[in-house]
Structure formats: C-alpha cells, structure tokens
Amino acid sequence: MPSSDFQDRLARLHQAQQQRKIAPGTPPGGPADNHRERLDRALAAAAAAGISRRDCFPPAMQALSALGLPIRPLHFKSLISLFFSGLCLGLGVFGGILWLFASDTMPVAPAGPIRGLVSLGWPGVAFLSLAIGAGFAAIIRAQAARAGLPRWRDL
C-alpha cells in the first residue's frame, strides 16, 4: 500500500474518532456497567495484545478477585499503585530474609548474597526495595504502552 494512501486512511480514522469522541482502544458498547465486566474487557484487550492472562492477572490477584475484591490487572493499574506493589514485594522478600538472618532465628548467615544482604542492613533493603518498586512500575507501564492497551476508565 502506498504511503500516501496509508496516511489518508489514518487521517480519516482519526477524524472519525474525534467526531465520535471515543478514546482509541475503547471497546464497542459503551462503558462497562460493573467491575466484573470491566475486568473481562481488560483481560480480553490484554490477550488481544499478546499479554497472557497469567502475566496480566497473576494467581494471587485472581484469588483476591475471587474473594470479591475489586482488583485491576497489572497492566491497567496506576503508576503509583505499581510502584507500591513492587516496593511491598521487595520489602517482603528481602526484609523477610534480613529479619530471618539478623535475628536469632538463624544463627549464621550463609556465604554469598545473603551475607551481603545482611551486611547492607535495613537501609540497603529499603534502597533495594525502592529500586524494585521503580523498576516494576516502569516495566509494566512500558509493556502496557507498547501493547497499546486502553486505560482502565475507558473500558
């Protein structure tokens, strides 16, 4: 297809979206009526973009959703929410390891990375957790942007 023909078609599509005032990627049928319908639309959009259900909606999130909590899939969460999720994950894992080996529960830290973590102490765990939170948020948001997923409120 010639480049000018492609540009003309793209301009017509953009004009039609502006006339209808619909955000790009918005599913047909208007906004969702409830959280479950919005969740189904989000998972369908992620699957259409090539993001597996397990990557977008991990088993722990599925369990919380099954309990009735209104949980968003990872690729539809806000940047702040993703940052705090990664921060809590880092604090839980590395803080738990540090607590285990710094307390009297485990008398001697084994050689290698765990001994290095123990030598860093709580400031090192806090810094590492902040870095994990920032990296987690950046990676998930970049995947969502690259896949062209709609925003949660547009579903």
Image: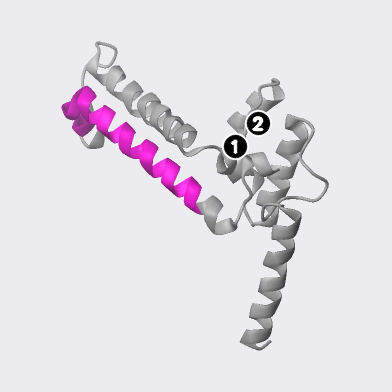
The type of residue carrying mark 2 is Gln
Between the residue at mark 1 and the residue at mark 2, the CA separation in whole angstroms equals 6 Å
Q: Residue at x 71, y 21 (%)?
A: 68
Residue denoted by label 1 = 58
Q: Residue at x 66, y 50 (%)?
A: 46
Quadrant of the image occupied by residue 114: top left
In this rendering, position of residue 84 left or right of residue 60: left
Q: In what quadrant of the picture does the N terminus appear? A: bottom right
Q: Is residue 22 above or below residue 73?
A: below
Question: What secondary structure is found at the residue carrying circle 2?
Answer: helix
Residue denoted by label 2 = 62
Q: Is residue 31 above or below residue 145?
A: above
Question: What is the x, y in percent for residue 131?
Answer: 31, 39
Question: What is the x, y in percent for residue 137?
Answer: 44, 42
**Residue range (magenta):** 114-142
Which residue of the protein is positioned furthest toward the top in this rendering?
104
Q: Residue at x 25, y 13 (%)?
A: 103
> Could you tell me if the residues under marks 1 and 2 are in contact, i.e. CB atoms within 8 Å?
yes
Which residue of the protein is positioned furthest toward the front in this rendering?
19
10 or 143, nearer to the observer: 10
Q: In what quadrant of the picture does the C terminus appear? A: top right
In this rendering, position of residue 86 left or right of residue 40: left
The type of residue carrying mark 1 is Pro
Residue 111 painted magenta:
no
Give the prevailing secondary structure in the magenta stretch: helix
